[in-house]
Image (tube, rainbow, N blue to C red):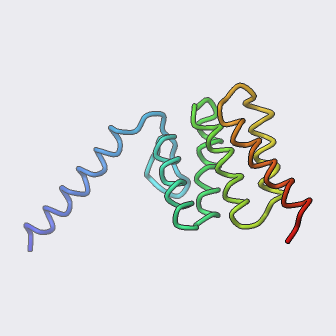
Amino acid sequence: MRLRVLASVLMTCALFLAAMTCAQAQVEIPGSNVQLSDKVLLEQATWAMETSKYAEARTLLGILIDSHPDSDYVPRAKVAVGDAWYAEGSFKQAEMEYRDCITFFPDRPEVAEAQRKLDSIQEKSRNPK
């Protein structure tokens, strides 16, 4: 029994240390002792999107945007926030996020994707089913 407890404690410590050493720019999640890098936040948000947890994805992306404003992932995160709104059918909110990406990151490759999605929203508004 003691061996199991010791093994569990050692495994928890090892996972914690691995997470701490792997993180790049780090952010502390409110109410938690865990710090996450911009990359980890984007990966978790992507997983949340893939499992249709759109509000969770928006929260993680918002944390990324707010806590890592100089990250190369911010333009991707802005588009992904728009995608989360779009997936829920909230086209006005999605449109605002795509426009923000175009406005604030005009030289980034994500702008082309944001523009395509804006065009799709405008097409839907012209031809509602």
Q: How many marks?
A: 0
Looking at the image, residue 32 sits to the left or right of residue 113; the answer is left
Q: Position of residue 36 (x, y in %)?
A: 46, 45
Residue 104 in which image quadrant: top right
Residue at the outermost right position: 126
Q: Nearer the viewer, residue 122 or 61?
A: 122
**Which residue is located at x 76 percent, y 45 percent?**
98
- Residue 40 rendering spot, x and y as whole percentages: 46, 46
Residue 21 x/y as whole percent: 32, 38
Relative to 60, say whether 105 is above or below: above
Q: Is residue 18 left or right of residue 44?
A: left
Q: Which residue is painted at 58% across and 66% down in the image? A: 53
Towards the viewer: 47 or 125: 125
Residue located 43% across and 34% down the image = 24
Q: Which residue: 76% across, 66% down?
A: 89
**Farthest bottom residue in view:** 1
Depth check, front residue: 55 or 85: 85
- Above or below: residue 86 compared with residue 4: above
Q: Quadrant of the C terminus?
A: bottom right
Residue 17 percent coordinates (x, y): 28, 45
Q: Quadrant of the N terminus?
A: bottom left
The answer to which of 83 and 32 lies nearer the viewer is 83
